[in-house]
Amino acid sequence: MGLILIIFLIILFFLLLKLNIYKTKGSIGELRVAKQLMKLPEDEYFILNDLLIETSKGSSQIDHVVVSTYGIFVIETKNYNGWIHGNENSEYWTQSIYRYKTKFRNPIKQNWAHVYALREVLSDFENLFYYPIIVFAGSGELLNVTSNIPVLYDYDLIDVILCKRNVPSISVEKAREITDRLNNINILDKKYRKNHVYQVHKNISDREDKIESLICPKCNGRLVIRDGKYGEFYGCSNYPNCKFTQNI
C-alpha cells in the first residue's frame, strides 16, 4: 500500500510540474506579446491583456485585445518550440521536435470563439471590424502553416496591425468607450478564473475522449472513415449537416 502511494505521489508531482511549465511558458509568451503591443501609438490603440468575459455560451479568456479606430484586433498567443504544422480548417495542429510529435488545439478556431464572444458583448456597437491574429512567441518555426488568418511571429505583430491603418471606422471616443466596456466586464476574481481554466481543460479532455471513441464532438454522431484528396480521414456520419473531420 505504501509503495502504491509513493508511485501515485511521484506521478502527481510530474503532472503538476508539467502543468506549471506549460503555464509559465504561456505567461512568458503573453508577456513578450504585451511588450510588443506597447510600441503602438497610445492615442490610437487601446490595449487589454488577459481579458476574461462572460457570454451566453460561457466564459471566454482572450490573451490580448487591441481596440482602435480601425478595428478590434483579437490576438491568441502561443509559445512553442520545434516545427509547427497546421491548417486553418484542421481540429489540431502539430508540434514536431525531431522525431517527437505532439498535437495542440487549432489556435485559429480557438481565436474565432474569442471573436464571437466579443461580438456578443459589443453587439450594441456599430461599424466594428474584427481582425483575429495568431502569434507564436517562442522559438518554434512555422514550417507548414496554411491560413487566411495571419499566423506570425511576435516581432511581426506591430507591422501587421499597422497595415490596417486606413480610413477609421469609428471615432477615438467610441474606441475609448469600447475599451471602458471591456475593462468593466473583465472578470478579475481568482476563484472564477481558476474554475474557467478547469472547465477549459475538462472540455478538451471530454472532446478527446469522444474522438477516441469515434464519436463526433460537435453533434455526437459516429466518426466513420472516408476517402479524401490526401487519403483517408474520419468524418462525421451526419455530413453535410456536420462537417467535423479528424485525421487518422
Image: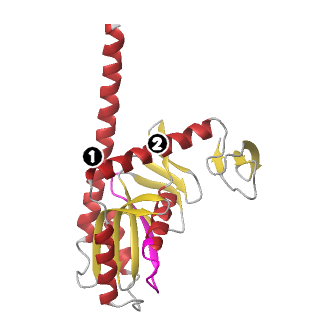
- Of mark 2 and mark 1, the one earlier in the sequence is 1
Counting from the top left corner in percent of width and height, residue 132 is at 45, 69
Q: Residue at x 29, y 71 (%)?
A: 184
Mark 1: which secondary structure? helix
Counting from the top left corner in percent of width and height, residue 182 is at 33, 72
In depth, the one of 74 and 84 nearer the eye is 74
Q: Residue at x 66, y 46 (%)?
A: 216
3D distance between C-alphas at marks 2 and 1: 20 Å
Residue of label 1:
24
Q: Residue at x 59, y 58 (%)?
A: 89
Residue of label 2:
202
Amino acid type for the residue under numbered disc 1: Thr
Q: Is residue 71 above or below residue 187?
A: below
Looking at the rendering, the stretch of residues picked out in magenta corresponds to 121-139
In depth, the one of 245 and 122 nearer the eye is 122
Amino acid type for the residue under numbered disc 2: Lys
In depth, the one of 24 and 183 nearer the eye is 183
Q: Is residue 44 above or below residue 245?
A: below
Counting from the top left corner in percent of width and height, residue 147 is at 54, 64
Quick check: 243 left or right of 203?
right
